[in-house]
Image (tube, helix red, strand yellow):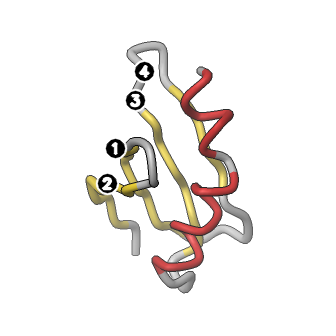
Amino acid sequence: MKGIDYERIKLQWTKIDYILIKKRKKTITIKITRKGDVVVTAPIYLEDRYIEEFIKTKAKWILKN
């Protein structure tokens, strides 16, 4: 089962809005579209807190792009 949600993560200095897609896969990926949307694809079974921690570790890269 695939799910798509619109999420927001708050960091100390800013916030990141992203589209979360959960589907059958083993890894988390982050893609930035040409329009500048951040799309995070993650395994269905992965808890949101792990996804948010992953996004936090990649925040500099996300904000740079």
Between the C-alphas of marks 4 and 1, the distance is 10 Å
* Cβ–Cβ under 8 Å for marks 3 and 4: yes
Q: Nearer the viewer, mark 2 or mark 4?
A: 2
* Cβ–Cβ under 8 Å for marks 2 and 4: no
Between the C-alphas of marks 1 and 3, the distance is 8 Å
Q: Secondary structure at mark 1?
A: strand
What is the three-letter code of the residue carrying label 4?
A: Gly
Q: Earlier in the sequence, mark 4 or mark 1?
A: 1
Q: Earlier in the sequence, mark 1 or mark 3?
A: 1
Q: Which residue is mark 2?
A: 8
Q: Give how far across and how far down residue 49 sits, in percent.
A: 50, 79
**Where is the C terminus found, in terms of image quarters?**
top right
Q: Which residue is mark 1?
A: 17
- Rendered residue at 51%/66% (across/down): 52
Q: Earlier in the sequence, mark 2 or mark 1?
A: 2
> Measured along the vertical axis of the image, is residue 45 above or below residue 2?
below
Between the C-alphas of marks 3 and 4, the distance is 4 Å
Between the C-alphas of marks 2 and 1, the distance is 4 Å
Q: Which residue is mark 3?
A: 37
Residue lying farthest to the top in this orientation: 34
Q: Give how far across and how far down residue 1 sits, in percent.
A: 40, 75
- Rendered residue at 37%/45% (across/down): 15
